[in-house]
Image (spheres, rainbow, N blue to C red):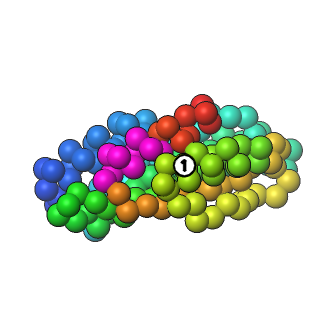
Amino acid sequence: MAEKVVVSPRFKKLCDQFSTILGGTEHEITKGPVCFVSRNRKFNAAILGRRTTSPLVRYQLFSFESLDKSGRALCLGETALFQNQVNRLLSNLRRNGIKVTAVHNHWLNENPRLMYMHWESVDNPIAFARKVKRSIAFLG
């Protein structure tokens, strides 16, 4: 059974808004507290010649934590994307003042070629969510 995390109504409301903006299919508040939002991208891919719809392959993850009195928090994000989408997403995030921290692959012998990008910012979570939503909108 998951541990019950007690959070302020303000944090819960902020987490709900953060998730709604990002189109999260699931969100939860974990110990910290950390607002954690997930969703899966919809695309066709294969690994080792086998079709996959695994959440391990198609995910998008977003979070915020360490919310201070001024309303700023550590905000993080990650997404699966096609290799030919890397430069556009990297540019979009940077244009929105978000630092890209990693671009890498997870799988071998996948088709099409998949990459994963991570990013971070200290920002108001709602402002961050809006910037990320704009940045990833072209991914569909």
Which residue is at the front of the view, 90 or 102? Answer: 90
| Residue 69, quarter of the rendered image | bottom left
Nearer-the-camera pick, 98 or 10 = 98
| 106 in relation to 90, above or below | below
Q: Does the magenta run of residues contain 130?
A: yes
Q: Residue at x 62, y 36 (%)?
A: 139
Secondary structure, mark 1, is: helix
* Amino acid type shown at disc 1: Arg
At 40% across and 41% down in the image, what residue appears?
A: 130
* Location of residue 60 in the rendering, given as x and y in whole percent from the top left corner: 54, 47
Image quadrant containing the N terminus: bottom left
Visible in this render: residue 30? no
Residue 92 image position (x, y, % from top left): 58, 45
Depth check: give the residue in front, 96 or 68: 96
Is residue 18 shown to the viewer in this render?
A: yes
Rendered-image quadrant of the C terminus: top right
Task: Report whether 51 appears left or right of 102.
Answer: right
Extreme residue toward the left, this view: 9
Residue appearing at x 35%, y 36% in the figure: 20
Relative horizontal placement of residue 53, taking residue 65 as reference (left or right): right
Bounds of the magenta segment:
124-132
- Disc 1 target residue: 95
Q: Which quadrant would residue 33 be assigned to in this image?
A: bottom left
Residue drawn at x 38%, y 62% is 122
Q: Give the main secondary structure, helix, strand or loop, of the magenta stretch.
A: helix
- In the rendered image, residue 59 lying in the magenta stretch gets the answer no
Q: Residues within 10 Å of mark 1 (few under 14, many from 20)?
A: few
* Left or right of residue 82: residue 27: left
Q: Where residue 37 sits in the image (x, y, percent)?
A: 41, 49
